[in-house]
Amino acid sequence: MRGTISLLAGIVFCGVLSPTNLRADERRPSIDRREHHQQVRIRQGIRSGELTRQEARRLEAEQARIRVDERFARRGGITPEERRRIQNELNKASRDIRKQKNDRQDR
């Protein structure tokens, strides 16, 4: 009897901690993580000379606008629509970083 209870408790405990029980938000890359990764890419482009000063300034301004949008969205809790909009802004920013780093303009 005691072994059966221990076995059931173990199964329930593993089921609670399994990765399939994570919320959908936690499985997707977070907004903050994506913003950080994009900042790293911009800094790397500046260091390597792939980005001109003007390109870097423009990309940094785009990142600042995204942070402001995120801050306003988080005030009342991010709705799925707001999250989608911010993710779309991050997608565009990522494309812009890639395009500017590979446009053959060097410092």
Image (cartoon, helix red, strand yellow):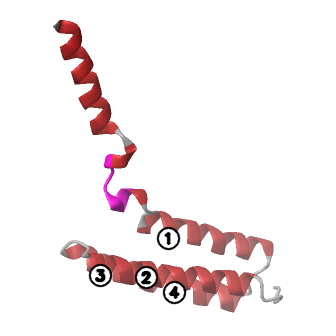
Q: Position of residue 19 (x, y in %)?
A: 39, 45
Image quadrant of residue 66? bottom left
Q: Does label 2 or label 3 sit earlier along the sequence?
A: 2
Q: Amino acid at mark 1?
A: Glu
Q: Label 4, label 1: how many angstroms apart (C-alpha)? A: 11 Å
Position above or below: 22 against 95: above
Q: Label 2, label 3: how many angstroms apart (C-alpha)? A: 15 Å
Tell me, yes or no, whether the highlighted magenta stretch contains residue 40.
Answer: no
Q: Amino acid at mark 3?
A: Glu
Say what secondary structure mark 4 lies in.
Answer: helix
Q: Nearer the viewer, mark 4 or mark 3?
A: 3
Residue at the (33%, 50%) spot, across then down: 22
Position above or below: 42 against 9: below
* Residue count near mark 2 (Cα–Cα under 10 Å), binned few <14, some 14–19, many ≥20: some
Q: Label 1, label 3: how many angstroms apart (C-alpha)? A: 18 Å
Q: Does label 4 or label 1 sit earlier along the sequence?
A: 1
Say what secondary structure mark 1 lies in.
Answer: helix
Residue at label 4?
62
Span of residues in magenta: 21-26
Residue at label 3?
81
Mark 2 vs 4: CB contact within 8 A: yes
* Side of 33 where 38 appears, left or right: right
Residue at the (72%, 75%) spot, across then down: 45
Q: Amino acid at mark 2?
A: Ile
Residue at label 1?
35
Quarter placement of the C terminus: bottom right
Residue at label 2?
66
User: Foreground: 32 or 87?
Assistant: 87
